Image (cartoon, rainbow, N blue to C red):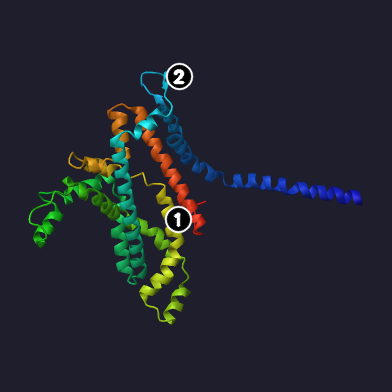
Amino acid sequence: MKNKNDSSSATVSVAPGLISKKNNWSILGKQKLLILMSLPFVLYIILFRYVPLLGWSMAFQDYKPYKSFTDQTWVGFKWFFQLFKEKEFLISLRNTVAMSLISTALGYITAILVAIFLNEVRQVGIKRFVQTVSYLPHFLSWVIVTGLVANVLSVEDGILNSILLWLGAIKEPIQWLAVQKYFWHIIGWTYVWKEVGWNTIIYLGAMTAIDPCLYEAAQIDGCGRLRKIWHITLPGIKPTIIIMMIMSAGHILDANFEMPYLLQNGLIQDVAQTIDIYVLKYGFKLSRYGLATAAGIFKNVVNILLLILANQLAKRSGEERLI
C-alpha cells in the first residue's frame, strides 16, 4: 500500500509539467492559422528592422564602398567623437529636439482637450462631424500636407496672408517660410492639424472605461461640468496619459523627416535641418558613410535610453508604466 502511494505521488509530481507542455503544443496547434497569418509581419520586422542593423558596422570603419567587408579599416569610436566636433550636427540635434518637444507638447494638449470636448458633446451629429473632420488629415501623406502648408503660407496668394490683410492685422504679406522664428511653430501646428483627431481616439477609449456612476454621484453633489472633468475625467485617463508620454519619450530624436526636408530653404537652413536630414546629407551626398551611420546610431541609442528613463521615473512615482 505504501509503495502504491509513493508511485502515485511520484506520478502527480511529474504530471503537471507534462500536461503543461502538452497544453502548450495543443494551443499552438489550434492557433496555427493565426501563427501563419502573423508570419509575414514577423518576416517583415526581421528583414527591414533587424537585418539592416548589420550596416551599423560602418560606424566603426573607414568605410569604402569599393572594398569588401573584410578589407575595411576599423577605426573604433572615431566617428562618434567626430560627431560632437561637427557644428552642423550640434545644430541638427538642437533643431530635432526643439521640433519634437514643440510637436509633442502641442499634440498632447490639443488631443486631450479635443477628446474631452467630444466626450462632453451630447449631440451625436455634431460629435460625428467633428470626429470625421479631425480624423481625415491623418490619412494624408506628409508630402501632400507639405504642399498644402506651402500653398496656405504662400506670399502671393496664400490664404493666411489674405485673411490677415483683410482683417488689417498686417500691412504687407509675411514670408512665413523665410523667417527662422516661425519655422518650428509651423512644424508643430501642422503636426497638430494632421494628427490631433487620430490621437484623440486613444483618450476617448480611455474615457469609456470610466464608471458612469462617478458622474452621477458628482451630479448629485452639485458638481458642474468643469469640476467633473477636473476630478473624474482627467484622473480617469491619467494612466493613459502617462503611458503615451513614456512612449513619446522614445521618439524625441525622431522629428518628422518629410516636412522639414521639403520646406527647408537657404534662409531657414539653420533651423530646419534635423538629424535625419544630416544623415541623408552626409551619407549619400558627401559619402561620409561612417559619420552618417554614427549619427543614426546615436539617435536610436538616445531614444532607447530616454524610453527606459521615462519608464523608470514613472515606476518610482507609482504611475503606470510599460514594463
Q: Is residue 148 visible?
A: no
Mark 1 → mark 2, Cα distance in angstroms: 44 Å
Q: Using residue 77 as the reference point, say whether residue 188 is left or right of it.
A: left
- For label 2, the crowd category at 10 Å Cα-Cα, with few meaning under 14, some 14 to 19 and many 20 or more, is few
Q: Position of residue 131 (x, y in %)?
A: 32, 61
* 122 lies above or below 276: below
Q: Which residue is mark 1?
A: 243
Indicate the quadrant where residue 67 lies: top left
Report the residue marked by disc 2. Answer: 70
The residue nearer to you, when weighing 149 against 266, is 266
Q: Can residue 101 be seen in the rendering of this structure?
A: yes
Dot 1 amino acid type: Ile
Q: Secondary structure at mark 1?
A: helix
Give coordinates of residue 286: x percent, y percent: 28, 27
| Image position of 212 (left or right of 98) | right
- Examine the image and state in which quarter residue 193 appears: bottom left
Q: Secondary structure at mark 2?
A: helix
The residue lying furthest to the right in this view is 1
Q: Is residue 100 above or below residue 234?
A: above
